[in-house]
Structures are given as structure tokens and as C-alpha cells.
Amino acid sequence: MKRQFWVIFLACVVATTLPAISADAQVAAAQQEVAAFRTVDFDWVDTSRGRKVPARLYWPAAASSGRVPLIVFSHGMGGTRNGYTYLARQWATHGIASLHVQHTGSDSGIWFGNPFGVVDRLQAAAQDDEAAARAGDLRFALDQILSTASSPYAGFIDPHRIVAAGHSYGANTTLLMVGARVVRNGRWVAFRDSRYRAAIVISAPAFYGEKDLAGVLANVSVPTLHVTSTEDDIRIPGFYSPASDRLAIFNAVPNSRKLLAVFQGGSHSMFTDRPLVGGVTLNPMVKEATADLTLAFLDYAFGGQVNGLSQWSATWRNLLAQLPAPMAVAASPAQRLLQPAAAGIPTATVSEASGAGRIAPNEAPDPAAARCSPRPMGFFRGSSAWAGDNCTDQNGTLSHGPS
């Protein structure tokens, strides 16, 4: 039997149902969103792997050539490209595009079919080859959207501000894209894509059951934002992952440009679109706080700015948890801005670097050109995730506003 990747099976997985609002409010919201952004659905197929890669692009209405940041998002177990809309809308209304990739081997399809086979389908979705295929999905999707031959968006995207992001299983996929690696058959297996310049890691599980987290995450050198809560626990038959696992991953990332927000209470699936989990009152507040924090993080990651972090702290600090000593995390000056007010830690004085953050290009060297190119064959024995070196595009369908 193949060794399983111990990912979190998102027990209460993605549901995109939002709280009911009045008809007038719905109309007003729709009008605002149509003006702010549009969505485009792609039904790509990576012929090299024989794998469908559906994706949804949230594209800001105000887009300037070469200046649009892009976030590539990976959903949790059982999710789809339609989820995490609270993040996508916030990003798009602030001029940031996001491409939400659907992973066909671990998407909502696992919930359909014989109900007695759900556990088997969950376990199959957590195998090595699906974890590798997910990384291949993000690479392929980025290839497609940056292809000047087939994507009308390629020339508008700023190649210096491309971010990997994900929740739960998607958080592990995100970490793979920015340098995480595992040992299989006595050798390191890595999927790093240097085009990703920062990472947003929400509720990252115990990383594939690896014991040497420092070694697994040693090559993560980009700025990272980690988000979790004190009740961000995973409980499924045969597997339990406490919230402390999320902190262990944060502590093991060697790059000092990392931030951690720990909300008090909540749940693991509170960070999906589900409106009630984690508390009827807390749920929408945490969603709004998380979306706002990602914006402040991008200013910090790409422009060295901390004003956004300070403002975020002033607004949302009362939601943050005071961690007990055994769960303490390293606190850089920027990290201290995200400490709860009850901690008794004075607000850090941090110099704000020049630069326009997420709205200005970074000065780093150009990344490798986007391309459909040969990639390493599967290091995972028996994996079909890296079966070839060609990729193809299919036209997307355009619609206005979130569907």
C-alpha cells in the first residue's frame, strides 16, 4: 500500500451557501460586484497527465498592463473552484486577481456515489499521487493563465506578485509550491515553482505525517501568512490533528518574514464559505478579518509596509487568542502587531519600507517565463501525476459577477 499523505480531510467541507439577505441588498451587492470584477470559468485539460483542471478566475475591473497581482488558490478536501468567495471578492475589489483551481481527484466528487464508499474515496484522495497531482494542477493553471499565446490576461498580470494560497489540503499544496518537500524512497521530492513569490496558508494540516518539519520546510524562503484558530481541530475516524499542528508548521518555516494570526474559538471549516460553523457571530467576523489580513500581508510581503498590519490589529485584535506558553511562537516586530490586546505586549514600532505594496511591482529578478514545458517525471512510485510534457488550453466562458 502506498504511504498516505496525512492531509486533513475537511470533514465539513466547502459549501458556498451564504446567509440570506434582503432582495434590495442582493441587488445592491450584485451591482457593486459587477462593477468591481467579473468571473471567468475555464475547463482546461492537461493532456500530458490526462487530467481535467477546472478553474475560476476573479478578474478586477480596473486592470493595468503588467500591474495586476495574482493569487492562485487551492481548495480543501471535497471543495471546488466555486468556494472561498469571501476571499475572492475582497481581493478582486482591491485590484487583485485570483485563480481558484479545482483538483479533480480530491474535489466534491468524493461525496458522490455509494455513501458507504466515502471513507475509501477520502483515503484515495489523500494518497501520494493525488498530492503530487494537486501541485501539478497549480503549475499547469499558472502556465495557462500566463500564456501569452492563449490568455488575454497574461499581459496584465505582474509576474513579480504571484501568490500561492490555500486552505487545509490546499494549504499543504500551497507549501509544496513554495518549497516544501518530503522524503520518498530515500530522496527529497519537491515541486517548488519559483514564480510564486509569497504564500497564504490557512489551516495547514500536520504536513503529510512528516516528523522532520524543519527539513520539510527548510526551503520555504518566500514571505508566508498563516491563519488558524484555537478550535481548528481535525477529527475523523483514525486521524486527529490538533490546532497546535498549525503552529508547528509556522514555527518550522525558516523565513523570518512570516506572520501568524490565531483566532479565538472557531473551527476548521469556518474558513470555507460555510456561514454557521465556528459560531454564528464569530464566523462572518473571522471571514472579514481574514480577508482584510491577506491584503495587509501582501503590502508587507511585496512593499515592506506595516501600516496595514497596524490598522488590521487595531480593528480585529479582540478576535485573536492569547496562546499558552507551550504554544508560543516566535515574535518578530511585525508578528507582534498580530498579538491579542490581552497579551500585554505593547504594539511594536516597525519602520515602514517604501514601495506601494500590492499595487506596485516588486524589484526582484524576472521569474522564468510562463510556458508549457517538460517537468520531472513522478518521484512517487506508480504516480501518474507527471506523465508527460505537453499541455493544452481550452476557452473559458465569461460571466459577470459571482455565479
Image (cartoon, rainbow, N blue to C red):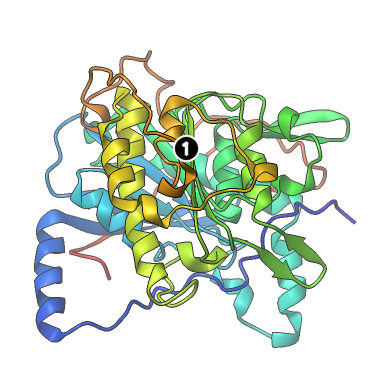
Seen in the picture, residue 312 relative to 346 is either above or below; the reply is: below
**Left or right: 171 with respect to 95?**
right
Question: Residue at image x 9%, y 68%?
Answer: 31
The quadrant holding residue 154 is top left
Question: What quarter of the picture does the N terminus occupy?
Answer: bottom right
Q: Nearer the viewer, residue 118 or 264?
A: 264
Check disc 1 and report its element: helix, strand or loop. Answer: strand
Question: Residue at image x 44%, y 21%?
Answer: 368
Question: What quarter of the picture does the C terminus occupy?
Answer: bottom left
Q: Position of residue 314 (x, y in %)?
A: 29, 45
Q: Position of residue 343 (x, y in %)?
A: 48, 44
**Circle 1: residue type:** Ala
Location of mark 1 (residue): 199
**Left or right: 171 with respect to 44?**
right
Classed neighbour count for the residue bearing mark 1: other residues with Cα under 10 Å, few (<14), some (14–19), many (≥20): many
Q: Position of residue 248 (x, y in %)?
A: 67, 41
Whether residue 281 is visible to the viewer of this picture, yes or no, is yes
The quadrant holding residue 302 is top left
Q: Position of residue 78 (x, y in %)?
A: 57, 68
Whether residue 290 is visible to the viewer of this picture, yes or no, is no
Q: Nearer the viewer, residue 1 or 332?
A: 332
